[in-house]
Structures are given as structure tokens and as C-alpha cells.
Image (cartoon, helix red, strand yellow):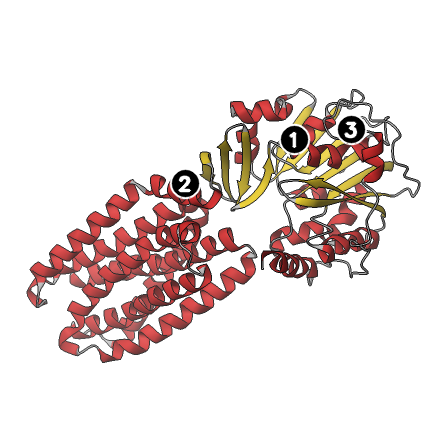
């Protein structure tokens, strides 16, 4: 019975140990961007800390192994369970360097987790288990637990429970293992009553955290965004949060502002009408990204447009902007218009598998903050887009800020040229973001700025549209290399450019 209990405890603690590692990595990528960097550094720090913990386990006396294992489980459960909530609240409310807090937390948890398996193996050794049987059983269940949580975390826990509740759940499991060990090995422990009381207190604290994690998330996001959070959810792909202050609705994805309802019309009018106005015959339009339906709203103003295909990765995004009353009012119900077809799929894969040709293409992806997004701005993907663009049509690409991120902007321009497009860069001022850039591209090389704006607009008029294509002296053209898939220099340019702005 004890052997089986110990084996099952190995499975649980291995699952929890990897779970804390994944939570820390995911939280860092949500809040800091650049998921490859965050996952790599968090995992590296965590594994190093586990090595330190394994080494420190040698100083636990043989007659004290059971007590120390119970204490370690309670400490891991407490620290690991609280870690996501504490780090999220600290990022939003406390003036402490977040990276320092993150790596200190990860190191301490990793060190405690690193002590678990050596202590379990020594407990087995006290049961006089044969060494080869001991090693094979413990490591087999250790790796099995890691496999289980690596599958369950992204598919079920993170999207259904969120990072905070998932952290509390893993903490409860660790504390539950401690309480179970106290029950099974009560006669061999020195302070079973005291340890039982501690385990109950830890379980109570973590259970309360699990129950109130929604409120904790609300407080954290209130501090992060400053406005009231009227909708928030974690999807398999991202964290969505909609905030409101008076008449201003704002969408945040992974903590990054996507639009403000007060000035989004400047962005979306500039994104759509300079290109679509130049092809008044366009009937079939493709939108890649733009799951908020705001670009589609502008496209549908053109009476000649008969079909709009929107390809956005996240079904939660398009569902939200199809059903939430204030958001539907903002996009004028564009996503439920009979002319619009919504497809939830990876844009790159959809381009590969589909053969349709479109008169006008809008590329409204999020900024290239990580390599997953950066690939959508690469030469191969733009060449895929070219296959779907009519010979006389145009494509427009959201291209970051030519003022704050000039290397990123001109790298996107160079990438489009490398993919075989003629390009016409332009920009507009959006108060929520500053000066923002777009690049119009086409297989044809004879673009002229439309002399009229044939649809109702709040910002654009003929003179304003012509001014979009003028770049002042402090925003010069830069000679940048294209963003190739194997190196993705654009992600590095974007990170470095915006770091200068933040500083």
C-alpha cells in the first residue's frame, strides 16, 4: 500500500512540478511578449534550480527524510499555488521589477521541486526496494506525470481554468500529497499533528484562492489596464480582456492594447479605404486577422463588395465580437452580415489549403511580438498571399509604427518586395498608439491615391488620404533586410525598437 501510494505521489508531484514551469512560462509570455525567449529563460532557470534542489537534498538526514518530504510538499504547494496570482498582482500593482520577481519565484519553486524525487527515492530505499526496480519505477512515473500535464495544460487547464486557478489546483494537489503521506506514514513521522495542521491550513488557503481567483484576476487586470474589465477570458491562443471607461471600449490581447473605440476609426479607415477605394470593381475581399470585425465594417461600406471572407485563428474572438452587444454596436454587426463568411483557422495553413483568388486583401495581424506571429510577416507567407491576390488587385498590411519601430516597418516593406510585390508605404496618427503604419502592395505597379472617398467616413477625406503617403524628414526610408522564416529578424527589430520607446 505504501509503495503504491509513493508511486502515485511521484506521478502527482511530477505533474505539478512541470505545471508550475508551464504557468511561469505562459504568464511571462502573456505579460512580457516574445514567447520563445520567455519560455526558454524560465525553463532554463527552473531546470537549473531543480539541479540545485537535488544537490541540497543530500543534506537531509536519513532519519528525517519523511518529515522533510512532507514539509517540501507543503512548501511547494503553497509557493507554487500562489505563484501565478502573486506575480500577476505584482505586475499590475507593485513597483518591483517583474523579471526579477519572476525568476526569483521560479528559482525557489524549482529548487523545492528538485528535492522531491531524490527524497522519494530515499523513502523507497528505506522500504528496501531493489535499486534497479526503484530507479525504473520512480523515473517512469515521473516522466509519465510530465507527459500528462504537458497535454492537459494547453488543451484543458489554461483555457478552461486560467493560469491563476490552474496554479491553485496544482498547489492543492501538492498539499494533498503531503496530507496523504502524513496519514500513511503517521507512525514514522516526528510531528504528525503539527504537520497535519499545517497541511489543513495550506489546503484551506489554496482552496480559498481557487474559489476567489476570478476576483484576484479582476483586481490584477484593473491595475494593469486602469479601467473596468467588462469581459475577460483565456482561450487556447491568448488572453482577451475588454475594458470600459465612460464611452471608451478597449480590447487588450495578452496585455497589449488592440484598439480604443474613441479613435479606432482612424486606424480602420486608413487600413481599408486607400486600397479598396482604388479598386472600385472589387467584389471578393479577404481579411486575415481582424477578428474584431472593425475592418470588415469598413469594407462593407463599399456597395460593390459582394463577399468578405474573414480568417481569424481564435473562435472566442469572433464569437465575442458577434454576440456582445456593445462590441456588435461598434462593428455594426459586420460579422453576422450575410455577405461575410467567418473561418476560424491558422491563416498560414488556410492560405496553403485554399485556392480562392480575391480582389482585395486586408492583413490585420497583431504586431510581430513573437516568432509565432513573426512567421505571418515572412517572405514565404507573403508569397502565399500573392497567389490569392488578383492580378489587378491590392493588398494592405498592418505594419507597426514607422516612427516608434522604424526598422520593423521598413523590414516589412522589404519583405513584401522580396515576395514580388510593388509597395506604397503610408501612415496615420492614432492617438491611442501614436503614428501608425501600413503598406499597400500589389502585383501591378501603377497605384494612384483615390481622388475621392466614396463611402461615409469620420476621419478620411481626399486631402487627408493623400497626406497619408507623405513621410516627414524625421521618418526616413531605411534599408532593411527582409524577414525570412529561418531567422525572423523582424521579431528582434520589433523588440529592440519598442524597448527604446519604453525606456
Report the residue at 90% width, 37% height from top: 448
* Placement of 493 over or under 254, stated as above or below: below
Question: Residue beneath label 2, please?
Answer: 160
Pointers 3 and 1 in contact (CB under 8 A)?
no
Q: Name the quadrant of the C terminus.
A: bottom right
The Cα atoms of the two marked residues, 2 and 3, are separated by 37 Å
Mark number, residue 284? 3
Residue 161 visible from this viewpoint = no
In depth, the one of 287 and 270 nearer the eye is 270
Which residue extends farthest front? 473
Residue 460 visible from this viewpoint = yes
SS label for mark 2: helix
Mark number, residue 278? none
Pointers 1 and 2 in contact (CB under 8 A)?
no
Is 361 placed left or right of 207 in the picture?
right
Question: Residue beneath label 1, please?
Answer: 294
Is 123 placed left or right of 111 in the picture?
left
The Cα atoms of the two marked residues, 3 and 1, are separated by 17 Å
Is 480 placed left or right of 241 in the picture?
right
Q: Which label lies toward us, 3 or 1?
A: 1
Q: Which label lies toward us, 1 or 2?
A: 1
Label 1 or label 2, whichever comes before in sequence order: 2
Question: Where residue 351 sits: x, y (%)?
Answer: 71, 42
SS label for mark 1: helix
Question: Where residue 430 sits: x, y (%)?
Answer: 68, 39
Question: Where residue 132 sits: x, y (%)?
Answer: 29, 75
Amino acid at each position: 500500500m505504501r509503495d503504491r501510494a509513493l508511486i502515485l505521489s511521484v506521478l502527482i508531484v511530477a505533474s505539478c512540478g512541470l505545471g508550475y514551469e508551464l504557468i511561469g512560462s505562459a504568464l511571462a509570455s502573456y505579460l512580457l511578449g516574445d514567447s520563445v525567449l520567455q519560455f526558454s529563460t524560465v525553463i532554463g532557470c527552473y531546470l537549473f534550480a531543480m539541479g540545485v534542489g537535488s544537490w541540497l537534498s543530500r543534506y537531509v538526514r536519513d532519519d528525517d527524510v519523511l518529515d522533510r518530504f512532507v514539509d517540501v510538499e507543503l512548501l511547494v504547494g503553497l509557493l507554487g499555488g500562489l505563484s501565478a496570482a502573486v506575480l500577476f498582482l505584482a505586475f499590475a500593482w507593485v513597483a518591483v521589477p517583474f523579471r526579477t520577481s519572476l525568476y526569483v519565484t521560479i528559482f525557489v519553486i524549482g529548487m523545492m521541486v528538485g528535492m522531491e524525487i531524490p527524497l522519494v527515492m530515499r523513502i523507497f530505499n528505506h522500504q528496501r526496494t531493489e535499486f534497479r526496480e526503484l530507479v525504473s519505477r520512480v523515473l517512469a512515473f515521473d516522466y509519465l506525470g510530465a507527459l500528462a500535464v504537458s497535454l492537459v495544460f494547453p488543451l484543458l487547464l489554461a483555457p478552461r481554468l486560467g493560469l491563476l486557478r490552474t496554479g491553485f489546483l496544482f498547489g492543492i494537489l501538492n498539499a494533498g500529497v503531503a496530507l496523504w503521506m502524513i496519514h500513511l506514514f503517521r507512525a514514522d513521522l516526528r510531528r504528525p499533528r503539527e504537520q497535519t495542521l499545517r497541511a489543513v491550513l495550506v489546503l484551506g488557503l489554496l482552496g480559498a484562492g481557487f474559489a476567489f481567483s476570478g476576483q484576484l484576476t479582476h483586481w490584477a487586470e484593473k491595475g494593469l489596464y486602469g479601467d473596468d474589465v467588462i469581459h475577460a477570458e483565456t482561450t487556447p491562443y491568448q488572453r482577451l480582456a475588454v475594458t470600459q471607461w465612460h464611452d471608451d471600449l478597449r480590447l487588450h490581447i495578452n496585455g497589449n492594447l488592440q484598439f480604443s473605440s474613441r479613435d479606432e476609426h482612424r486606424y480602420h479607415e486608413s487600413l481599408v479605404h486607400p486600397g479598396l477605394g482604388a479598386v472600385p470593381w472589387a467584389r471578393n475581399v479577404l481579411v486575415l486577422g481582424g477578428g474584431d470585425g472593425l475592418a470588415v465594417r469598413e469594407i462593407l461600406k463599399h456597395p460593390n463588395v459582394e463577399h468578405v471572407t474573414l480568417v481569424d485563428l481564435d473562435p472566442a474572438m469572433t464569437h465575442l465580437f458577434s454576440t456582445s452587444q456593445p462590441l456588435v454596436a461598434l462593428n455594426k454587426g459586420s460579422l453576422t452580415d450575410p455577405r461575410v463568411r467567418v473561418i476560424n483557422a491558422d491563416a498560414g495553413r488556410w492560405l496553403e489549403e485554399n485556392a480562392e483568388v480575391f480582389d482585395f486583401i486586408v492583413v490585420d495581424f497583431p504586431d510581430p511580438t513573437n516568432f509565432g506571429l513573426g512567421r505571418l510577416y515572412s517572405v514565404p507567407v507573403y508569397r502565399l498571399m500573392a497567389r490569392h491576390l488578383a492580378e489587378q488587385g491590392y493588398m494592405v498590411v498592418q505594419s507597426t509604427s514607422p516612427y516608434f519601430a522604424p526598422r520593423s516597418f521598413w523590414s516589412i516593406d522589404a519583405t513584401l518586395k522580396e515576395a514580388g510585390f510593388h509597395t506604397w508605404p503610408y501612415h496615420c496618427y492614432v492617438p491611442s498608439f501614436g503614428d501608425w503604419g501600413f503598406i499597400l502592395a500589389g502585383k501591378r505597379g501603377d497605384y494612384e491615391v483615390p481622388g475621392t472617398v466614396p463611402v461615409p467616413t469620420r476621419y478620411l477625406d481626399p486631402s487627408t488620404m493623400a497626406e497619408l503617403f507623405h513621410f516627414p524628414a524625421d521618418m526616413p526610408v531605411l534599408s532593411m533586410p527582409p524577414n525570412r522564416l529561418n531567422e525572423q529578424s523582424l521579431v528582434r527589430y520589433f523588440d529592440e525598437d519598442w524597448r527604446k520607446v519604453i525606456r
